[in-house]
Amino acid sequence: MTTATPTVAVGTQQVEKSPGRAARIRKRLNTRTATLVSIVIALLWTVPTLGLLISSIRPEDQIKTTGWWTFFSDPQFTLENYQEVLFGRSSSSGQLASYFLNSLAITIPSVLFPLAFAALAAYALAWINFRGRDWIYIGIFALQIVPLQMALVPLLKFFSTGVTLAGITLLPAWDLDGSQKFAQVWFAHTCFALPFAVFLLHNFISQLPKDLMEAARVDGATHPKIFRTIVLPLITPALAAFGIFQFLWVWNDLLVALIFAGGGDETAPLTVRLAELAGTRGNEWQRLTAGAFVSMVVPLIVFLSLQRYFVRGLLAGSVKG
Amino acid sequence: MAVFARPRQAFVIAGVLGLALSATACGTGGNDSDSKADSPECAPYEKYQGHDGKEVSIYASIREVEADLLEQSWKQFTDCTGITIDYEGNAEFEAQLPVRVDGGNAPDITFLPQPGLLKRFADAGKLKGVGADTKAMAEQNYPADWLKYATVNGTLYGAPLGSNVKSFVWYSPKTFKEKGWTVPTTWDQLIALSDQIAASGTKPWCAGIESGDATGWPATDWIEDLMLRTQTPEVYDQWTSHGIPFNDPRVAEALDRAGTILKNEKYVNGGFGGVKSILTTSFQEGGQPIVDGKCALHRQASFYANQWPKNAKVAEDGDVFAFYFPAIDPAKGKPVLGGGEFVAAFTDRPEVQAVQTYLASGEHANSRAKLGNWVSANNKLDIANVANPIDKLSVQILQDKSSIFRFDGSDLMPAAVGAGTFWKGMVDWINGKDTATVLQGIEGSWPK
Amino acid sequence: MNFDFADEQPKLLMLMYGLIAFVAVVGGLLLLLDVVPARFAQRQEGKLVAASASGAPLPRRPKQREYLFGLFFLLPTVLLLLVGLVVPAIRTVLLSFMDSSSTDWVGLRNYVWMFDEDAIVRVLTNTLIWVILVPLLATSFGLLYAVMVDRARFEAVAKSLIFMPMAISMVGASIIWRFVYAYRGEGEQQIGLLNQIVVSLGGTPQAWLQEPPLNTFLLIVIMIWIQAGFAMVVLSAAIKAIPADIVEAARLDGVTPWQMFWQITMPSIRPAVIVVVVTLSIATLKVFDIVRTATNGNYDTSVIANEMYNQAFRYGENGQGSALAVFLFILVVPIVFYQIRNLRQQREG
């Protein structure tokens, strides 16, 4: 069981033990060049973001007239851009904290639901024998391509008018108000996330050792039991991995939230507010820069704090793919 | 199915709780307005009474500070009538509204800035024609020229709300005085002035047409203004309704005339660089070089007044002001290009109609004008309530009987052209494509 | 308006309901499947004992139950997908054969339009360029970097920096790159990094995003910048998972790094590479925000998803927008076939 959750360090540690003086020297040289090159590339990769960060703390007229690198020769510092983004200019638009809470209320269930449903589905598609399961899997996989823009109208119709077939109401309209509208956003995000989630998790689950499953079956374990006691612990890292992807996606989403939650401070997430502030109708760069940074903070924290888990998560799946 | 019902049950429970909470909230609010309804300042709103506790949702593109002013402008109305107006403004409005409407989630009222979009919703049977009260109010307060833009197959779908005048050229009275330039009143004077400024070493004109996903629209305003100046208003109407093809020689003439300024390296782009810098300069930044004297003239609508730095005085004797974009042939009258939004409704409940009627009234026009920064074609609007000099000039032009008013052409055309290929065509045109190719491309994209 | 916590309570309440619903649904489903079959099994057991005692043929129970379990495990996903994606997909296909207001059937007119109009053909070719270059370059870069960083110090830091763009929204990333590509006239102070470099090397500044076909490649750079981190993290994990003894044995045999890469590393991580390429291909086909934010599809940079959005939402041309969406479905067919083949191999192997 433990073999399926190897740790990151195993590979390198063991390689380091490899004998031979020449090999060791070559290895050290290798390490030095590799370190240098990879750090340089990583820094280059970060330059655009750094430029944005520096721009966001420069005064408006400076941003518009000189490049951000002039900050180093002529540092002019201001927090005004952040002030505008965080506290806004319009009295009716409410506080940023309000939108922040909305983002949380939208994101957490929108990550949990697809995670659970996709894990169940992926397990069924990988380990339960029934006819047509491969075709269902391929179908779900192919659904990844449906552009979510095309799904907005029908889904909105589903919420606002319910489902009627030949004059009989199968499902009533949801008719939600205020913060209840979060439910619609969760529903929509869950739908849109499932194909990728099933694809990813199926990749992991189907690679679990066959003997393990068969042994459990022979012992008389039912599918729910195997799922709970064997599969779930093994794929926890994979779940964490998908969880992060889904978190990043939902947190950064604008379109789904706009349609299903609306634009008020009662339900709209941070992204909606920041888009408003940044003004899509022109380049008010000073606010764009600060706004982009404010929206990046939480995803970065989530990523950095779960990064180790994340790497392990993907690792488990790609042991054999 | 059984399993699936579970979250829905939770939602229903949540819904019931939520309703109970909001019901208590409404209760207290209702009492408040009851006491106010009888007070003397509520007298003008008597005819809108009888909808206490009702809610009307409005969805539009007006947001931020402008939206605050708007909400303030109808505050007394809502206080006195007890109607709650639930306003939502969004920058993505034009793309979002069709989704909401098709999805069965339309707002009660919307402010449509494009008659083309209004026609689309009206043709699809989504909009409700205005009630008798609103119709009477609209006909009483607005010129027929305006109402025809909200009339589809003989039915009026909404009265105008705010308006703007687009036929303006911004300049700096201060610089003009220093250099001894005079404000031109004919096209020839305008060109002579441009040459004079160009000879002095400054590029006379500046422009910027970058505007996010609406990039190109400021250039279409140029073409529309020149269509009105080189052709008759009737040809303009044929052009916007596709009565003549988009690549008609008369349209090409207007484009080429605009090109004598916009594509003239000697004239543009003061403060930014060459002709192509028009493309990357945002609409907001477009006229800013006027303040530092790097450019002298900028053709842009009245609402550009909001873009000037806070310390610049916008007045005839101030730092910046605008003059009327002169006619080419004064004998043809004084063509005015403008825009505005229309108050259309997707529902026809009594309280919705009451709000619609109120928004067409003189009370609202004056209430909103007093808060500043607003123009309307409403003839009940008392010019004394308009403080800002540029708004005053706009109202004067709109109320001037010799003006020939025409609505912004791109807003009249089908969105595929008016918000699509016309914008993109202008971008290509300024980026170097020739007039014939650009016009042919736009003509080809006109929906069949 | 001050921040009033009382105003926020309904949100937290709703979040709580959401969590309760989650626990109820998932827990309930598992419980249901756990308890009910257990009871059922007991009865079956009883029958089984009775049957074997009486010498009657054994009932074939596992097969039937497998099917039921599969059904229940799949139920939430299948229902949600039906409502959220299958119905919309069918609707899109139908709309693509109808006119702009979706009232009359027009046959193949929208598809003819797609290949007739030069601007749209341009959009289709752009999409092809994107879907070929992005997966190829992002995966190659990610792979190279993963191999390199595997032997480097400060590995975690370096990886975090490369992965960071993933945490930024596509819109945010495009804003960042608009800064890099920004253009000011010759002789003016440049505010874009790229032009500043060009100028300091003695060149003339360019309006990068306005020059086709170069601008499409510059937009592709943005996508690669974002997605290379994803490729790198997945592939790096796969490389680390190659059993150490294999690597060591090869090293003792004295293989060159080149041979090591092609003979050991690549075959071992092939499945991971496939996951990355497939995921990136689909993400690229749907790319929308980058083009919209950076150029809004002007200057010949538009791609299918943008044009589809414009046609269907901004222009009200539902038929033409849907036809473009259907074209996207068609583009993914080769990937689907590839997946089917993979699945077959897996089942056999």
Image (tube, grey):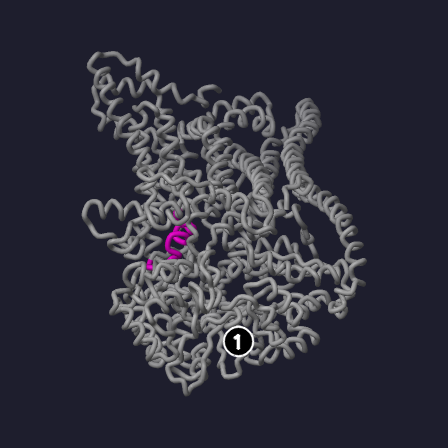
Q: Secondary structure at mark 1?
A: helix
Residue at the location (29% across, 69% down)? B197
B20 displayed left or right of C317: right
Q: Would residue A278 be seen by someone viewing this image from the given angle?
A: yes
Residue C104 visible? The answer is: no
Q: Is residue A60 magenta?
A: no
Quadrant showing the C terminus of chain B: bottom left
Q: Residue at x 34, y 19 (%)?
A: A12
Percent position (x, y) of residue C217? 30, 50
In this orientation, which residue lies closer to the viewer: C116 or A302? Answer: A302
The residue furthest bottom is: B331
* Residue C46 x/y as whole percent: 70, 25
Which span of residues is magenta-colored? C284-300
**Left or right of A134 on screen, residue B74:** right
Crowd class of label 1 (few under 14; some 14 to 19; many from 20; radius 10 Å): some
Look at the image and say whether residue C293 sits in the magenta stretch: yes
Residue at image coords 64%, 71%? B360
Q: Chain of mark 1?
A: B
Q: Which residue is mark 1?
A: B396
Q: Where does the N terminus of chain B fall, quadrant-wise?
A: top right
